[in-house]
């Protein structure tokens, strides 16, 4: 039972404020050990993949995968987070408007292999970003408001190629003791969301 979390809503404004105030305890400077551990499952021997980072923040794993020769696409509402990603990793970037959207822009590394969309994930579709061979979902499904989970999962499924792999990190704890995010997402719910 998700308890009181079902009703909880974190607004985009609140996320932007967390970034401004530096309350980004979710960011892992060293990257996530579970991506290292399960990398082979994500890649499955394939090279040159398109990999999606939903709600990407300034995750350093984006650079890891780009350095391995993959193309990385992320989406994040905080422009500050995206700029910090490029500057803190010493990567020059350019900004461009995204055709077919109202006010979204994309920040792209000069080498073109990392494209980070600055907009809400709900503004994206496969017509805009294409489809992906792999997804790294850490701090994403668990950060989405519980009332939006179904919509999020349907969107993610629509962005996946048939042969794609999806690595998902969720958190388990007593949802009556913390209000989240990260929200409690048990395996039974993952199964009902993604089938
Ligand atoms: N995945 C990252 C960040 C996790 S925190 C990591 O592992 O470090 C969740 C992030 O989602 C925050 O940076 C927040 O600004 C962003 N976010 C929240 N709602 C969003 C939305 N609707 N669309 C895009 N990004 C969003």
Image (cartoon, helix red, strand yellow):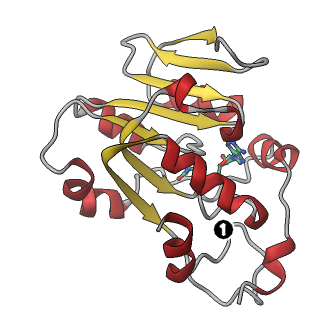
Residue in the picture at 56% in, 82% down:
172
Where is residue 121? Give x, y as percent. 66, 40
| Depicted 113 relative to depicted 166: above or below | above
Residue in the picture at 39% in, 14% down:
112
In the rendered view, does 7 fall on the left or right side of 168?
right
Secondary element type, mark 1:
loop
Say which quarter of the image contains residue 171.
Answer: bottom right
Q: Nearer the viewer, residue 96 or 32?
A: 96
Where is residue 173? Give x, y as percent. 61, 86
From the image, which quarter does the N terminus lie in?
A: bottom right
In the rendered view, does 147 fall on the left or right side of 93?
right
In the rendered view, does 182 fall on the left or right side of 13?
left
How dense is the environment of label 1, judged by Cα within 10 Å: few (below 14), some, or many (20 and up)? some
Which residue matches tag 1? 182
| Depicted 189 relative to depicted 103: above or below | below
Tally the numbered discs.
Answer: 1
Where is residue 48? Give x, y as percent. 22, 30
| Depicted 1 relative to depicted 162: above or below | below
| Depicted 179 relative to depicted 76: above or below | below
User: Does mark 1's beta carbon lie closer than 8 Å to ligand 1?
Assistant: no
Where is residue 58? Give x, y as percent. 55, 40
Q: Nearer the viewer, residue 108 or 25?
A: 108
Residue in the picture at 39% in, 37% down:
132
Residue in the picture at 52% in, 31% down:
126
């Amino acid at each position: 039972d998700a308890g009181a979390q079902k009703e909880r809503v974190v607004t985009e404004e609140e996320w932007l404020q967390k970034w401004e105030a530096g309350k980004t305890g979710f960011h892992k400077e060293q990257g996530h050990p579970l991506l290292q551990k399960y990398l082979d499952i994500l890649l499955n021997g394939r090279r040159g993949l398109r990999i999606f980072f939903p709600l990407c923040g300034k995750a350093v794993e984006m650079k890891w995968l780009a350095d391995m020769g993959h193309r990385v696409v992320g989406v994040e509402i905080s422009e500050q987070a995206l700029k910090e990603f490029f500057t803190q990793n010493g990567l020059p970037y350019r900004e461009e408007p995204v055709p077919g959207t109202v006010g979204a822009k994309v920040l792209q590394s000069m080498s073109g292999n990392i494209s980070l969309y600055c907009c809400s994930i709900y503004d994206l579709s496969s017509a805009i970003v294409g489809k992906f061979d792999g997804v790294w979902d850490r701090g994403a499904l668990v950060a989405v408001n519980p009332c939006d989970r179904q919509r999020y999962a349907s969107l993610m499924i629509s962005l996946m190629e048939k042969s794609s792999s999806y690595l998902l990190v969720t958190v388990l704890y007593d949802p009556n003791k913390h209000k989240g995010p990260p929200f409690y997402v048990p395996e039974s719910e993952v199964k009902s969301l993604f089938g």
